[in-house]
Image: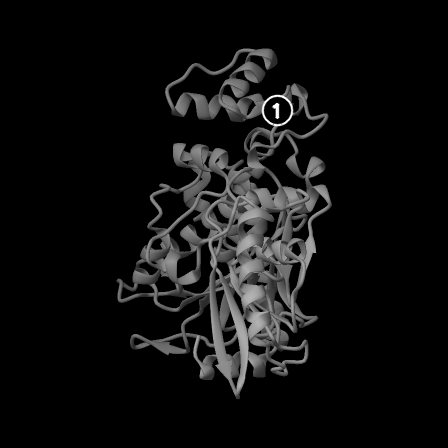
Amino acid sequence: MDSAELLGILSRGEDTRHQFKENVTHAKSVGAELAAFANGLGGFLLIGISDNGEVVGLTNEDVRRINSLIANAASHNVRPAVDIITENLEFDGRIIVVVTVPPGTNRPYFDCDGAIWQRVGPDKRRLHSREELRRFFQDCGLLQADAIPILGVRAESVERRALAKVMRRIGEPPPRSDKAAWAQMERMGLVRADQLTFAGLLLFGKHPQRVMPQFSLKAVYFSGEDETSTSFLDSEDYEGRLPDLYSNAFAFLRRNLRKVQNRRSVNARGGLEVPESVLEELLCNALLHRDYLIDAPIRLLLFDDRIEIVNPGPLIAGLTIDSIKRGSSYIRNPLLTSFAVKGMLPYRGLGTGIRRVMRTYAKVDFDNDPETRLFRAIVRRPSSIENGELLPSKPLSGERGANDKLFRTMGRLFESVRGNIRPDQTAFCE
């Protein structure tokens, strides 16, 4: 670290990766600070700086003592030991000690009392609650939320026909009784401790949202470009098993996105303004990689200028937006994913989906926010004139907007009854 970098840190103040200390005297306290940094994104402990960012400096004797204390804390007051780098830096005639703590590769890290600490903003916090510990171990890759058994959810909650359909698809005999279905799901890891797991409920449960309301998906088409708007053109709350959530969300997009000719024949049906393969990949990612320990639904938000898919749970520690664009991947819910690739969703699990999205449609951005624990995929809708085609840039408003909403309602009604139409009536309905 040079003086210019230090000056920038001082001007910004303390945050998740930077902690100021005037002096340190206790190895136990320092060990907790080092463990908190190692349990997160790593960071810098700057000693010889007051809380308000003033460089107070250290004496030569302090520097020698602190370097010895830091080395002792890193090796004896953190379990497992952390690798650190210490640097004595002169700034404005004063000496400070900069301790660099890289992100831990052997998490979790405990202090000498066995406590787990995490950085939260400019401070550290000890993890106490079961929810916090579960989420932390999930981020460490030591716990998969989809494999957690749900207390009290037994065989009567399983939709045997849904399980039989998947078994036939993969070439295995379908279960002939509820008892056989339960045993089959146990062999596949969907039942643990004689309880249905999160994955088992979401894949084959009769009414998943009655047990876990956060397994739902909320879709809203806002009027305008602001999600705080009180006016919307379409809204749905979707429940059901994993394939139901996917198909209903896709139907919502097909219903509300514009159709474009894309240089096809005038007699050909138009395609969606955003390639379907892009929406397909992003919806699958949301359903398979969300954090099911967070009590919040997936949100599908449609605006005049963009589509947002808001996922509970940021990227797994070690992944960044840049890395997933390059093809890095981590399976947060391996049980769900293992069944998705068996044909329950249009998903291959190759870890190349985001790269294909960016290659197919460049107007996609991502926002990863560990503080709010949200991951957001943002798909920009095409402008009014693109590729030589004239497209409506705004939804209809006023009386025409009311008519447009009526047509969408009629479309939903048609979709709901179409499954009951006899084959000889199809031509009439077309």
From the viewer's side, name the closer residue of 219 and 5. 5
Q: What element carries label 1?
A: loop
Which quadrant holds residue 240?
Answer: top right
Q: Is residue 247 visible?
A: no
User: What kind of residue is marked 1?
Assistant: Val
The residue where tag 1 is placed is: 158
Q: 182 and 46: which one is in front?
A: 46
Q: Nearer the viewer, residue 173 or 130?
A: 130
Q: In the figure, 343 relative to 265: above or below?
A: above
- x, y (%) of residue 200? 57, 29
Farthest residue toward the front? 61
Q: Position of residue 345 (x, y in %)?
A: 44, 40
Residue 95 lies, in percent from the top left, at 54, 79
Task: Name the image colouring.
Answer: one colour
Quarter of the image where the N terminus is located? bottom left
Residue at the bottom extreme?
92
Above or below: residue 90 compared with residue 337: below
Which residue: 52% across, 47% down? 81
Query: For this rendering, which residue is in front, 361 or 320?
Result: 320
Residue 3's spot in the image, x, y percent? 46, 83
Q: In this view, does 88 lie to the left or right of 122?
A: left
